[in-house]
Image (spheres, rainbow, N blue to C red):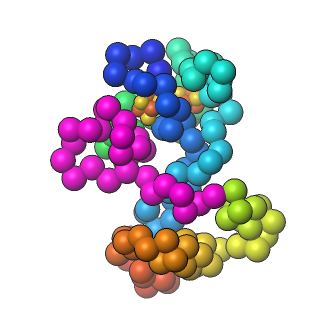
């Protein structure tokens, strides 16, 4: 996201698409279509916000919790919550694309099941079915 800037290591992790379930951000293995794997750079960096409205600037990405935990731009932010890695994989995305998961509640159940199996801590908002959630 911040390629070409001083601290960026060009790992490309912030340019992965995200899946948001009950306000919790999950990293997916799908890269943004503008990301160049050969160079590790954005192909449209100078006009990225114009061509991709979902692409956030550095401050917004840090505030929204889009950068991975090992990104230099968030290393010193106390209490920073990074996207959850390894839960939303190609298999889960195939279930969504294939119509096996069609609603938020089913998706919530699936990510909770996977996180439980992986021994991960479940964020509180993921423990509440959408019907009972207050916005
Ligand atoms: S447009 Fe895509 S590849 Fe370019 S910086 Fe934004 S998220 Fe990364
Ligand atoms: S996650 Fe951080 S280090 Fe990696 S490409 Fe994005 S800005 Fe650069």
* Residue in the image at 42% along x and 82% along y: 128
* Residue in the image at 74% along x and 67% along y: 95
The range drawn in magenta is 65-89
Q: Quadrant of ligand 2?
A: top left
Q: Quadrant of residue 77?
A: top left
Q: Which is nearer the eye, 58 or 80?
A: 80
Query: Where's residue 102, x and y in %?
Result: 71, 72
- Residue 132 visible from this viewpoint: yes
Q: Which is nearer the eye, 114 or 124?
A: 114
Residue 93 located within the stretch drawn in magenta? no
Q: Which is nearer the eye, 39 or 47?
A: 39
Query: Where's residue 53, x and y in %?
Result: 55, 34
* Residue in the image at 76% along x and 74% along y: 100
* Residue in the image at 27% along x and 49% along y: 80
Give above or below for 20 relative to 50: below
Query: Where's residue 25, x and y in %?
Result: 46, 56
Q: Quadrant of the C terminus?
A: bottom left
Residue 43 placement, left or right of 68: right
**Magenta span: chief secondary structure:** loop
- Residue 64 visible from this viewpoint: no
């Amino acid at each position: 996201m911040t390629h070409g800037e001083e601290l960026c290591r060009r790992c490309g992790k912030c340019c992965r698409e995200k899946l948001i379930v009950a306000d919790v951000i999950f990293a997916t293995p799908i890269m943004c279509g503008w990301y160049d794997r050969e160079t590790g750079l954005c192909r449209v960096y100078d006009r990225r916000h114009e061509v991709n409205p979902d692409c956030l600037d550095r401050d917004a990405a840090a505030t929204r919790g889009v950068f991975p935990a090992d990104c230099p731009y968030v290393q010193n932010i106390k209490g920073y919550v990074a996207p959850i890695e390894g839960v939303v994989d190609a298999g889960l995305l195939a279930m969504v694309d294939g119509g096996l998961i069609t609603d938020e509640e089913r998706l919530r159940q699936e990510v909770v099941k996977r996180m439980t199996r992986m021994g991960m801590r479940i964020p509180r908002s993921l423990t509440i079915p959408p019907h009972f959630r207050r916005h």
